[in-house]
Image (cartoon, helix red, strand yellow):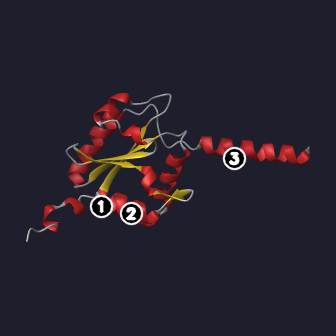
Amino acid sequence: MRPLFTFLFFFILCCGYGQSVKIYNPDADVSSAISQGLIRAKSENKHLLLQIGGNWCPWCLKFHKLCADDQEIKTLISKSYVAILLNYSKENRNYAALKKLEYPQRFGFPVFVILDSNGKRLHTQNSAYLEEDDGYSKKKVLDFLTQWSPDALKPENYPVK
């Protein structure tokens, strides 16, 4: 009986801990956040990186943790993007914003949308392609972020011969 109680104690502790991490704000004004992000992106010559997901999503939390803990990824995001977390949950599905972004939720969560500094959607990334084993591949994430950075899309990087 004691092993069962020990198991239940640790199970409840782990489940409760996972639910206590709150990186997405269901009450956030998404339109305002995107507008402010675009102003900042334009002034800093960056793109807008929207990470769409929810606090209920373990893969969303894993991706956020990878970006926060890995210095190389963190530096690349800081250099090339204005990052915004866009909530999708039962409390707030942000349908109007997702409609404007052409329904990225069709790929599951998290899903990433990159906008240029004028608000034009450049890319929607299905996060499944960035996964490896029970997490995310650092190499795949860096490749994705590098390939959609403002520097990667400069015409002078692709001279016509």
Q: Which kind of residue does numbered mark 2 sit on?
A: Leu
Q: Which residue is mark 1?
A: 147
Q: Which kind of residue does numbered mark 1 sit on?
A: Gln
Q: In the picture, which quadrant includes the C terminus?
A: bottom left
Q: Are marks 3 and 1 in contact (CB under 8 Å)?
A: no
**Can you see residue 74?**
no
Q: Earlier in the sequence, mark 3 or mark 2?
A: 3
Q: Are marks 1 and 2 in contact (CB under 8 Å)?
A: no
Q: Which residue is mark 3?
A: 14
Q: Quadrant of residue 81?
A: bottom left
Question: How many badges with numbers are in the image?
Answer: 3
| Mark 1 nearby-residue class (10 Å; few <14, some 14–19, many ≥20) | few
Q: Which kind of residue does numbered mark 3 sit on?
A: Cys
Q: Residue at x 28, y 58 (%)?
A: 149
Judged left or right of residue 145, residue 150 is: left
Q: Nearer the viewer, mark 3 or mark 1?
A: 1
Judged left or right of residue 138, residue 31 is: left
Residue 122 is situated, as x and y percent measured from the top left of the image, at: 25, 48
